[in-house]
């Protein structure tokens, strides 16, 4: 019995140490952001494939892009960066202005979001939705 109690106490002590050492989420207080806040928050906002090169890329990013990113909501960072890569800019007018590109990319990233539960389980469309067969321009079912 003593052995069992000592194992239980040891397990509790180890679990408290693990919880204590877990990294806390960086608070997102909204724009404008500083360079340090951008780098810290980007771990949760940008693709994992981009994280390794981010510090070097951010140091070389043009001023207009840095200002635009730091003054935008953090959910929009990746669409802004991607549209800039495609050649769109926020500081020009006309067809190369980045606003429409950024909005379209963000909306595209959110399209299938309602098909997933918070714990990562796929939610099937209802039978009524399938029968209605209302679809988006991308062929996805719209269940409203």
Image (cartoon, rainbow, N blue to C red):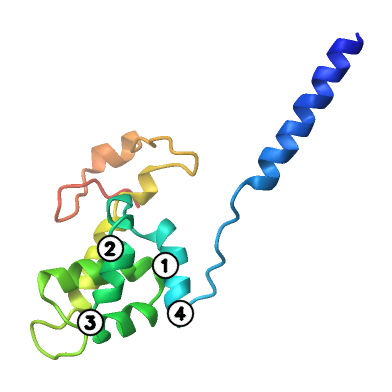
Q: Within the image, what quadrant is residue 91 found in?
A: bottom left
How crowded pointer 2 is (Cα within 10 Å; few <14, some 14-19, many 20+) is rated as: few
- Tag 3 secondary structure: loop
Task: Please tell me which of labels 2 and 3 falls first in the chain.
Answer: 3
- Tag 1 secondary structure: helix
Q: Nearer the viewer, mark 2 or mark 3?
A: 3
What residue is drawn where x is 9% and y is 88%? 94
Task: Please tell me which of labels 2 and 4 falls first in the chain.
Answer: 4
Q: Nearer the viewer, mark 2 or mark 1?
A: 1
Q: CA distance from mark 4 to mark 1?
A: 9 Å
Image position, residue 29 (x, y; %): 54, 74
Task: Please tell me which of labels 4 and 1 falls first in the chain.
Answer: 4
- Tag 2 secondary structure: helix
Image position, residue 50 (x, y; %): 28, 56
The total of numbered circles placed on residues is 4
Q: Which residue is mark 2?
A: 107
Q: Which residue is mark 3?
A: 62
Task: Please tell me which of labels 4 and 3 falls first in the chain.
Answer: 4
Q: Within the image, what quadrant is residue 14 found in?
A: top right
Image position, residue 123 (x, y; %): 39, 37
Task: Please tell me which of labels 2 and 1 falls first in the chain.
Answer: 1
């Amino acid at each position: 019995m003593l052995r069992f109690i000592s194992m239980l106490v040891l397990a509790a002590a180890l679990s408290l140490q693990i919880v204590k050492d877990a990294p806390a989420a960086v608070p997102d207080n909204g724009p404008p952001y500083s360079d340090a806040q951008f780098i810290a928050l980007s771990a949760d906002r940008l693709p994992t494939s981009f994280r390794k090169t981010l510090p070097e890329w951010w140091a070389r990013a043009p001023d207009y892009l840095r200002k635009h990113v730091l003054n935008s909501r953090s959910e929009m960072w990746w669409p802004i960066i991607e549209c800039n890569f495609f050649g769109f800019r926020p500081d020009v007018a006309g067809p190369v202005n980045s606003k429409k590109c950024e909005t379209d990319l963000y909306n595209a990233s959110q399209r299938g979001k309602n098909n997933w539960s918070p714990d990562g389980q796929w939610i099937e469309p209802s039978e009524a939705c399938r029968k209605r067969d209302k679809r988006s321009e991308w062929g996805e079912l719209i269940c409203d």
